[in-house]
């Protein structure tokens, strides 16, 4: 499973950080920072999907 | 055999009777009139989950710049400089200025403070067998928290609650909000023609801003008083007093009114479903999910008005530019096309996307704070009052076209 995040779509709702701080951090203005590159560790795949499903801006994409 | 005919399908957000039975009326709208037209009040409405979500995401068609409360909408751009009533690019720039104050880190730091406020408000009711949960707690906690976040001194929470209640209130048979019709006040302005603010709460703002400019702190008034706002033309300049007042009124109002309604719904729904409450008593880790279900089941702000910017086809009908569209997010939350068995209240329900905080660019900036207040309030309520009871013939409703819930909820506590 691969995860990607589109910074230009992010509006700083912080759902991803609330749901999965292992995968996302936020900057000082509240925009998300993706902490993993490429492959999502198997124990975090459910959370990655949850983040993608919950993003109000559809800024997170899951592949595979 | 006699057949029972349903009454003619009619909906508006003003009728008190419809408001109380809104989920039943919305169910008929979804099935019989997924695009609903009301000639009397000159609006359209969509009620299905997919249509409401699509409407919220399509901010180029469904604009906020003419206002988002039906009776306050204006032909021209809404004059009050609040980002909830703005579209991109202004909306994006104005929202960004304060979004840093609502990050999970900023909000998470409030946990102990919110718990202490709950203690202060609820301790007096230890051993009391009956009190008004909304009037004495649910409607006081949120303004206390939001005013603290803004940087107000203590003591203005009840003033804020009272002024918000009257701003949004609509009398039976009327459709006008006080905010739009105050005498001697330019439409949409928070300052009247004589330069008065006319509110015990917001009268404090200019002097507080002076204090923050002299001695900055980490509160939101400091941000508003000392940061420059990036303007749509690329320039930056400090906020005017009117702009600071608008930010303050928006954040204070939105943070106070909606969370108060959520807590009222929590008290009523959990009393109505004691088996669900027992699940929360047995396993506190279910509380965040319960907050989501309470928000889904009874959206505190279930009606969002938008201005149709250009002709758009919805369910085969062309809606002309300049129309008013209601996005019934409270109805979308009860759509069986999205949520199985949607009228069942289930604190263990798996919910990815309910519509109570809106969606897309205007998603509630205070959602993380609302969720935190809800969780702490519910934990304390379960700890303190165990199996409370609500006689639903005794509750009193608020009456607005945009916020739905209770003004008073007397609860009976079995000590």
Image (spheres, rainbow, N blue to C red):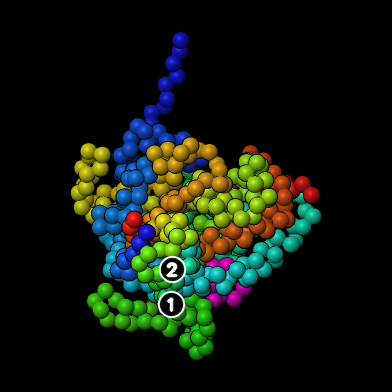
Q: Residue at x 44, y 71 (%)?
A: A25
Nearest-to-viewer mark from 1 and 2: 2
Q: Which residues are magenta?
A: B145-154
Magenta-span inclusion, residue B147:
yes
Image position, residue B383 (x, y; %): 71, 56
Q: Residue at x 77, y 50 (%)?
A: B129
A49 horizontally vs B369: left or right: left
Residue B315 in view, yes or no: yes
Q: Secondary structure at mark 2?
A: strand
Magenta-span inclusion, residue B194:
no
What's the magenta bit mostly, secondary-structure-wise?
Answer: helix
Q: Residue at x 48, y 77 (%)?
A: B221
The residue positioned farthest toward the top in the image shown = B1
Residue B86 in view, yes or no: no
- Chain letter of mark 1 equals A
Residue on which disc 2 sits? A24
Q: Residue B380 or A16: which is nearer the viewer? A: A16
């Amino acid at each position: 499973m691969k995860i990607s995040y589109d910074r230009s779509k992010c509006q700083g709702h912080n759902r991803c950080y609330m749901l999965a701080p292992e995968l996302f951090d936020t900057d000082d203005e509240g925009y998300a920072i993706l902490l993993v590159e490429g492959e999502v560790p198997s124990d975090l795949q459910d959370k990655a999907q949850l983040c993608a499903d919950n993003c109000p801006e559809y800024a997170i994409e899951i592949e595979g | 055999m006699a057949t029972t005919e349903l009454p003619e399908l009619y909906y508006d957000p003003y009728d008190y009777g419809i408001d109380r039975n809104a989920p039943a009326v919305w169910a008929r709208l979804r099935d019989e009139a997924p695009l609903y037209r009301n000639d009397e009040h000159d609006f359209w409405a969509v009620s299905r989950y997919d249509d409401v979500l699509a409407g919220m995401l399509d901010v180029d068609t469904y604009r906020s710049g003419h206002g988002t409360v039906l009776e306050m909408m204006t032909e021209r751009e809404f004059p009050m400089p609040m980002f909830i009533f703005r579209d991109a690019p202004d909306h994006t720039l104005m929202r960004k200025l304060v979004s840093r104050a609502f990050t999970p880190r900023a909000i998470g730091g409030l946990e102990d403070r919110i718990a202490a406020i709950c203690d202060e408000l609820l301790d007096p009711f230890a051993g009391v067998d009956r009190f008004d949960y909304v009037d004495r707690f649910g409607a006081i906690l949120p303004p206390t928290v939001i005013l603290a976040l803004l940087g107000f001194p203590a003591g203005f929470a009840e003033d804020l609650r009272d002024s918000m209640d009257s701003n949004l209130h609509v009398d039976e048979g009327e459709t006008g909000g006080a905010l739009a019709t105050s005498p001697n006040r330019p439409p949409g302005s928070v300052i009247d023609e004589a330069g008065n603010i006319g509110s015990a709460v917001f009268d404090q703002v200019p002097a507080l801003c002076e204090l923050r400019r002299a001695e900055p702190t980490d509160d939101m008034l400091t941000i508003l008083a000392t940061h420059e706002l990036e303007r749509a033309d690329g320039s930056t300049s400090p906020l005017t007093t009117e702009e600071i007042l608008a930010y303050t009124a928006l954040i204070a109002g939105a943070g106070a009114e909606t969370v108060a309604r959520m807590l009222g719904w929590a008290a009523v729904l959990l009393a109505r479903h004691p088996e669900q409450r027992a699940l929360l008593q047995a396993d506190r880790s279910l509380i965040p999910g319960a907050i989501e279900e309470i928000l889904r089941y009874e959206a505190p702000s279930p009606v969002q008005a938008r201005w149709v910017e250009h002709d758009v086809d919805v369910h085969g009908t062309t809606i002309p530019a300049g129309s008013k569209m209601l996005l019934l997010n409270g109805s979308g939350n009860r759509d069986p096309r999205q949520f199985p068995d949607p009228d069942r209240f289930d604190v263990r329900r798996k919910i990815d996307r309910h519509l109570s905080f809106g969606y897309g660019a205007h998603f509630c900036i205070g959602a993380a704070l609302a969720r935190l207040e809800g969780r702490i309030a519910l934990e304390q309520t379960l700890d303190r009052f165990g199996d409370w009871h609500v006689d639903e013939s005794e509750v009193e409703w608020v009456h607005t076209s945009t916020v739905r819930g209770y003004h008073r909820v007397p609860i009976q506590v079995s000590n």
